Image (cartoon, grey):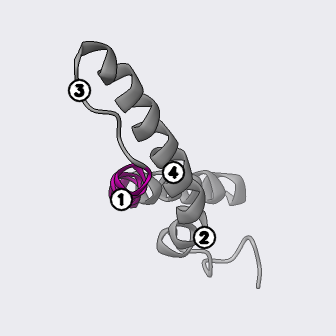
Amino acid sequence: MSVTGRQWSATRIAVLLYPFGWGAFAVNVFFASLIGSWVGFPVATTPVALGLGALIAVPATYAFARHIRRLMDQADA
């Protein structure tokens, strides 16, 4: 599979990067809930942080994959 070819669509890149985005957003949700606890909000449990992280990671990872695809196209031009 060629890196410079169009076989690497934004969707394919997003699928490959999704586990990393999921983990990053789950950690961010947990730490945001810790900051929220200073003003009285509950601290997110592990399943809640993982669930919200999984949900938020879908559009964010796809947007990042589109950005990476544009950079790949610019590098090929």
Q: Secondary structure at mark 2?
A: helix
- Which residue position is annotated with label 2? 16
Residue at 51% in and 51% down = 67
Q: CA distance from mark 2 to mark 3?
A: 34 Å
Marked residue nearer the N-terminal end (2 or 1): 2
Mark 3 closeness class: few <14, some 14–19, many ≥20 residues within 10 Å: few
Residue at 43% in and 56% down = 50
Marked residue nearer the N-terminal end (2 or 4): 2
Q: CA distance from mark 3 to mark 4?
A: 35 Å
Magenta stretch contains residue 48: yes
User: Magenta region: which residues?
Assistant: 46-59
The numbered mark at residue 51 is: 1
Marked residue nearer the N-terminal end (4 or 1): 1
Q: In the image as oriented, which residue stretches furthest toward the right?
A: 2
Disc 3 residue type (three-letter): Phe
The numbered mark at residue 67 is: 4
41 or 69: nearer the viewer: 41
44 or 5: nearer the viewer: 44
Marked residue nearer the N-terminal end (2 or 3): 2
Above/below status of 48 relative to 43: below
Mark 4 closeness class: few <14, some 14–19, many ≥20 residues within 10 Å: few
Q: Position of residue 21 (x, y in %)?
A: 53, 54
Disc 2 residue type (three-letter): Leu
Of tags 2 and 3, which is closer to the observer?
3
Q: Position of residue 7 (x, y in %)?
A: 62, 82
Q: CA distance from mark 2 to mark 1?
A: 19 Å
